[in-house]
Structures are given as C-alpha cells and as structure tokens.
Amino acid sequence: MFSPSMHFCQRCLRLLRRGMISIITIKHPTNYVAALQQPLDYHKTSMRRMCSSFTPHLNLHSGQRSSKISIGRLGVGALRGLCESVTQHGQVKQHDCEEPEAKMLIPHKQGQAPSRKVPLTTLVDLEDIPRLSALEEISDEEAVQIVVPHALPPTSFSLGDYVDKSDTLTKLVQLGVELWKLEQQRNVGSMLVRLDFQSDVAPRLLFLKDLGLQDGQLGSIITTNPFILTERLDKLKARVSYLKSKKFSTNSIASMVSKAPYLLNFNVKRLDNRLGFYQDTLGLNPEKTRDIITRLPRLLCGSLEPVKENLKVYELEFGFRTGEIQHMVTEVPKMLTANKTKLSKIFDYIHNTMGIPHSLIAKFPQVLNAQFLRIKERHLFLKYLGRAQYDPAEPNYVSLDRLVALPDDVFCTSVALATVDDFECFQKTL
Amino acid sequence: MSTKMSSPARLYRKLEGLFSVFKPSGIHWKLVRDTIEANLLKEINAAPSPAPKLEVNFQALPSGESGTTKELIMAATQLPVLSASPQVRGPRYRTLKVGVGHRLDAFSSGVLVLGVGQANRALAEFYSSPVTRDYTLEGEFGMATDDFSYTGRIIERTTFDHITLEKLEKILAMIQGGHQKALITYSGVDLQSQEAYELAVHGMLQPHSKSPPILTGLRCIHFQPPHFTLEAQCVNETQRYLRKLIHEVGLELRSSAVCRGVRRIRDGPFGLQEALTRQHWTASDIRRGIKVHRSMLKAFSKVSDSTRAEKAQSKQRYQKTGTADDSTANITATTPKHLHSATEEAAENVSP
C-alpha cells in the first residue's frame, strides 16, 4: 500500500495537531471557510456561490461520487484525484445533497466519532490559535501522522508525475495499460487522472470480464481504447445485447472486442447499418457474414467508403465475377480494406507478367495480400531456374500459396530446389 | 564475450558503425532507412533494461489491540517506483540517427551505405571523399522514352539490326575519351607538369566535388541485341545521368535505347558481397556487417600505409632531381591530397 497522499494547508495541519476539529458543517459560507480554503484559491468563487447552487467541488470523502470539474487542466484533476485517494481518515457519512450546504470535511484523529457535528458558534476563533514553534515537542503518533505533501506539479505533460500518487493510475499500470502511449493523445491524460477506480473503472472492467475477456487482455484494450472507461455502462450492455440478438456467440463477441477495442463505442444504429451493408453487398448467407465480421471486426469500426471502392475495383478493374469475389472475401476478409494502389500493382504483375488467369487467383486470394517484392523476387528466381510453372494441368506445378506463404528457407529447398545463399546472390542481381 | 544479456545502451553502442545494404528496385531510399531504423529500435528496446528503481515506503502496522499501546509499529518496505517503469516512461530509445551515404533513386537498385549514431561523422567524410562507384547498366535497343527508362512514355521506336558489338565498343571508347579529358580538366592539375603525368600514370587523378558526372571507366559486358549491359565507373554521378547515357549510346548508334536497370555494385570500398539483403536488415546481421567492414578497412589502411610510404619516398627523389621551377614546387606542395587514393582516405576517415 502506498502512503496516502494528502494535501493540507498550514492551518489544517495545526488544527490536526491540536485535535480540536472533527467535522464542521457549515450552514452558510463564511469568510472563515474561504480563508481556510486559502491555498486553493481557484475554489474561492465557487465556494461563495454555494448558497445559490450546489456545485460539489472538492469532496474529501472516500470516493463516493465522481464530481465533474469542468476545468481542463491536468493539475486540478490531479488534486481531486489525490483527495479522493484519502481513504484513511475521511470516514464520513454522506449527507443529503439536496440542501445547498457546503460540507467541508477535515480528517480527524482516530478514535473520535465520525458523525459528530460541531455547531458554528463553537468554532475555533482564528485569533486564538497560538503560534507554533518548530521546537515544540510532539508525540511519535502525531509526528507520524504529519505527512509532508510532495510538490506535485499543477500541470504536466507526463502521467509519470502523478502515477505514484494516484490510485487509479497505479491500478491501471498494474493491469498492463501503457500510459506513455495514452498521454500522447490530447485529453486522455487528464481524463485518466480524473477517473475514480471504484466508481468508473472497476464496473467497466467487470463488464469486460463478463464478456469473456481474460485479465491479460484488459490492459491492451484500454491502451488502444481508453474511452471505453467513459462510455455509459447501459449503452455498452445494450450494444452487446444487440450483437447477441444478431446471433453472435459470446466467444465471438469477446474476440471481436479484443481485436477491435473501439467496437463497443459505436452506437447500435451504426453497428446495424454496417452489418446490413455487408449482408446486402456481399450477398452471403448470415453465418458466413458473421464469420467474416468475427475474423475482422474492424470492418464494423471504419468507414464503408474504402470497402465500396475496393469491391468496385475487383469487379470493374480486375474483372472478377461475383462468385469469385465472394469466395475471396470469405477466405481473406482483409481484401476488403486493402490499399488500392498496392492491390493494382500486385494484380497487374500477377496477371500480366506472370500470366496467371483469374480463376487461379480467385482460388488463392492470399496472393493479393502478400508483399509485392516477395512475389517478384521469388517469381524471377523460379523463372531463372526454369521452374516458374503455375498451370495446374502441367507437371512441376507451383501453387500460388506455396509461392507466397512459405518462409524463405523452406521455399528455396522445396520449391526452387536451391540454397538460400543462391537466392540471396540472385536477389543482388535484380 | 560476456554471457549476460546486454542492456539497450550497450547494444546501441555495438550498432554504431558503417554498413551497406542492397536496396531493391522500386523502393525509395528513405523507406529503406526508415525500415532499418524501425528494426534496430525494436531490437534495442527489447533488450532487458536495468532493474527498476526502488523507493522506501513506511507503513503503519496495527499495533495489537487498539487503545492498549500508544506505540506505532512502522514497517519499511521497498517498492518499485512506477513513474520509472517502462509502461509509464515508454521505450528508452524513440529515434535513432541512421544516415545514408550516396543515395539511390527509386528506379535503381544496389549498394547503399548507411551509418548509425557516431558513425554518421565518418559517413559524412566518406560522402565528401572522392570515391568512385561502379554501376551495371542494362539497356534495350529499339525505343526511346521521356525519362530514359522502360517505364516511361515511349517517344520513338527504331530498328537496331545494324548494331554490332564493334560499333558499340567504338562509341563507348569515344565517350570514355571525352570523359578522360573532362577528368583532367576538372582535377585542377596543370597538364604540362611532371606531377600530372605521375598522377595520371597511377590513376590518381580526381575531379573536385563541383564537377559534372565523370566516367572513369566504361565497357560493355554483355551484348545480345536488343539487350546489352554496360559497366561504368563514375564520380559525382546521378542515376538519371546514367540512364541518359544509355539513351545517348542509342542515339550515337543511329538507333534508340532505353534503360532497363541501374544497379550499383560498388560504392568506394563497399562491394556487393557484404551488402545485406532485405531478410538481413536486423540488428545482429547489421552488427556483423559493421564488423566485416571494420576489419576490411584495417587491412586497407595497412596496405595504404605501406604504399603511402613508397610514394613519399618517390616524391622526395623527384624533388631532389627535378627542376627548381617554382611552379612545379608549388604543385608538389599543394597537391598532397591527390596522392591519396580514394579508398585510403575512406580508410583513415572511417577507422575508429
């Protein structure tokens, strides 16, 4: 357990030592309150407005409710996160929030009743507080309870300044979240520091676990999509139930979320729209469509325009028939989101230079997914050796998947019947 | 060689050196450089980092029954500081300084010299030193295009039945003669001096850096119409100039020619044999390449030291017996740099 981080002004410290203050319920905001809040100057105005509207600002209770501070600076959020991590002392009962009361809760010494209220009239008068001397003798217990606050920077460009002090960030690091990646995005750092682990993060982690995700996957999911921690739980559950209604199994939903963490951030209408599009345009039966989506869930996340363009390219530019396209897409769903220029380059080389007909390419669609240089070098090597024979009817046939998918050493020994050194020497002649 | 795994910093120090890769055709040189930087970064950051920093924390333990004793038991524990963990800080190395020597355009392939870290200084000296480069130029008779390569827009088509190897070699000799004259002009040496003769005899004439492309050697290594292959040794060249050379050869032969490939087979002391192919663009192979290059240069510098000593002796002899002409004396004094061969200069610049 880490040392509890507390931020107290000088007066609070003195009052602590005196053991004179437990809980003060202030009926009306007074200058005393403002004065006590002195080091936190930016809250003065909000404190004065307490009468008119109840705006919870600095709640020093143990993480009951996450308040929404609209200030966008990392520092303020950090302080609030700190204050919420004060679990040791703030054992205060939550009062009704309807009353426009400012509740200022100062941690008290152990042993005293938590709900004791001290009326305003018996408050300690400021002038009565005697001056303290540095040579004053105090007991060990009191000495131990004095915590010198670390100089936390009010603003920072790195979460490393706050991770040791913030409970949420510590637990996220223990989960496996890569904070260095998240702090590079614009408002994500501030958002993470403002989160409360018990009320914000934990329910969503439990929700993900209920989906069927493993503990080890949670860290990477949050790293890719930190906004899943701010998405409303009821909406997340609605989207999962929608996918279940479309007959996606629990396992497939879990694998889809782990492959495309942004999936559950999209609303039901959008998911429905996309599923409908794939169902209509691909023209496959629902089970096959579901299989494609499960294998490549980012089809549901991204835009549909590139997919439409790719399908047009296959049909009009390359000249594949609908049945061939359907077969290729079920084999290699990545073809729907591949880069157009790369596809054209590879297809041009395979069809025009290597002379492979459409039917054979449709049989081995992974060839369109491969690296162009690999295809080119291996083909030229086989051509140099006289083994570039891609017609299944002829002897010594080399299938396209073996040409492309095999690693170099296996390719050289089994397909080209040469050594890897020969292949490298040949590469240097190209 | 210690058995324990090296830390990222140690691995980085071992990778600081010059090495050469084989750039495939159709790829921009910057993509090669970026790929190699990414591969090296991945392996350097994967190396085990030193033990995490620990911080002492005190915890107040509950002291038996509350209220009975006033003493607090404090326990001191050492816990890792999370702000120093790689998950919060990120990878130790985010960029590497990988520099490129003489560049190759996207159409060409061949030896590309790269340097990492501190070796970029040696790379800069190597880049400015007067080393020559060897190219293999593949040409095809019968057509001419706008950018002199076979992928360009065809401008004209011609016949090439009249072309023979003899005619081609005549043209090449004519071109080479022109370049030899240019070499002498741009080397800044007085043609009438004894020193110029000595340099020319030993093949030590070098043009200064501002000269146009000069071919120090040109020959035909393969001739089968319409395809032919030339080998060229050049200084201050660009690959587009070499493609234009093929085009001009075609024009001189009263036909037209287009370039099918430009391949650099040597860049100074870096040859084709040590160049790393695409599969070997990893940290371990690059380390091996750096070692090979260093040992090669050490051997070179030994040879060049001995030859330099010989040349110094011969120079002294000439100074004693030569004329008392001021101009020659001046030339002798001011042209020691021309006495060094290209490879020697590279050797002494690059040797650590």
Image (tube, coloured by chain):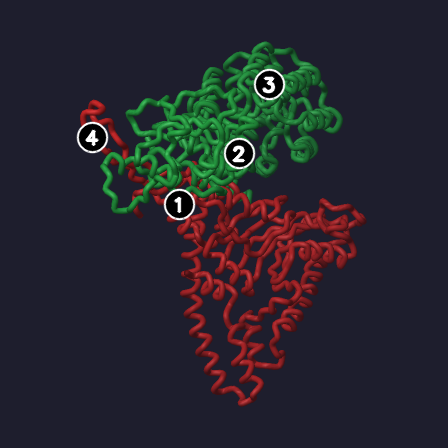
Chain colours: A green, B red
Q: In this figure, which residue is indicated by the disc labeled 3?
A: A292
Q: Are marks 1 and 2 on the same chain?
A: no
Query: How far is the residue under mark 4 from the one under mark 3?
Result: 68 Å
* Sequence-earlier tag: 1 or 4: 1
Distance in Å between CA atoms under marks 3 and 1: 41 Å
Label 2: chain letter: A
Chain holding disc 4: B
A398 displayed left or right of B284 = right
Measured as percent of width and height from the top left, residue A366 is found at 59, 26
User: In percent of the image, x 52 and y 73: which residue is there?
Assistant: B337
The residues tagged by marks 4 and 2 sit, at their Cα atoms, a distance apart of 42 Å
Name the residue type under label 3: Ile
* Residue sitting nearer the eye, A135 or A69: A135
Q: Position of residue A375 (x, y in %)?
A: 59, 34
Above or below B184: residue A287: above
Name the residue located 29 percent from the left edge and 37 percent from the top edge. B57
Residue toward you, B95 or A333:
B95
Residue that label 2 marks: A48
The secondary structure type at the circle numbered 3 is helix
Residue type marked 4: Lys
Q: Amino acid at mark 2?
A: Arg
Where, quadrant-wise, is the C terminus of chain B in this rendering? bottom left
Whether marks 4 and 2 lie on the same chain: no
| Residue that carries the numbered disc 1 in the rendered image | B8
The furthest residue to the left: B69
